[in-house]
Image: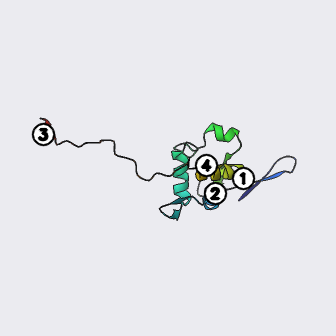
Amino acid sequence: MIEKTDDIGHTTYWYTATEVAKIVGMKHDNKTLGRNNFIAMLRQNKVLMENNMPYHYYVTLNHIQMHTVQKWHMHYIPIFSQTFIEYCKKKVASGEWKFVTKMPPVVKKFENIDDIM
């Protein structure tokens, strides 16, 4: 959990993807999604872009922010608000957000090249 305090002293709490995945408790193959699969699910449902940056819609709603982390080098991670957690729980419970591990094949019917020529 990350605490952020504004100029007038109001503190808000923001949660990392690991914490949100545990709180939401979304299941896939009878296992709870971890951080990596949870982020992949958010990408599939158009909450995060391919580079894990949030779409502007969720930033303007104050659901997601980017937080700077300094380890070996400075990088950014998405952090989520309490209102996003409630929003996410509703979307998962209603079945709107799903996690797909295997994409269907693009080619429906395979042909032998020798039969065509």
Q: How many numbered marks are there?
A: 4
The residue that label 3 is drawn on is 115
Q: CA distance from mark 2 to mark 1?
A: 9 Å
Q: CA distance from mark 3 to mark 4?
A: 48 Å
Q: Secondary structure at mark 1?
A: helix
Q: Is residue 53 above or below residue 24?
A: above
Label 3 Cα neighbours within 10 Å, binned few <14 / some 14-19 / many ≥20:
few
Label 2 Cα neighbours within 10 Å, binned few <14 / some 14-19 / many ≥20:
many
The residue that label 1 is drawn on is 82
Q: CA distance from mark 1 to mark 3?
A: 59 Å
Residue, far bottom: 31
**Mark 4 and 1 residues: CB-CB less than 8 Å, in contact?**
no
In terms of depth relative to the viewer, which is nearer, 79 or 108? 108
Residue, far front: 94
Residue 74 - label: none
The residue that label 4 is drawn on is 91
Q: Is residue 80 above or below residue 117?
A: below
Point 64% across, 37% down: residue:
57
Q: Quadrant of the C terminus?
A: top left
Please indicate whether residue 47 sits to the left or right of residue 99 in the image. Answer: right
The residue that label 2 is drawn on is 20
Tell which circle, 3 or 4, labels the residue nearer the N-terminal end. Answer: 4
Tell which circle, 2 or 1, labels the residue nearer the N-terminal end. Answer: 2
Q: Is residue 74 visible?
A: no
Q: CA distance from mark 2 to mark 3?
A: 53 Å
Point 85% across, 46% down: residue:
7
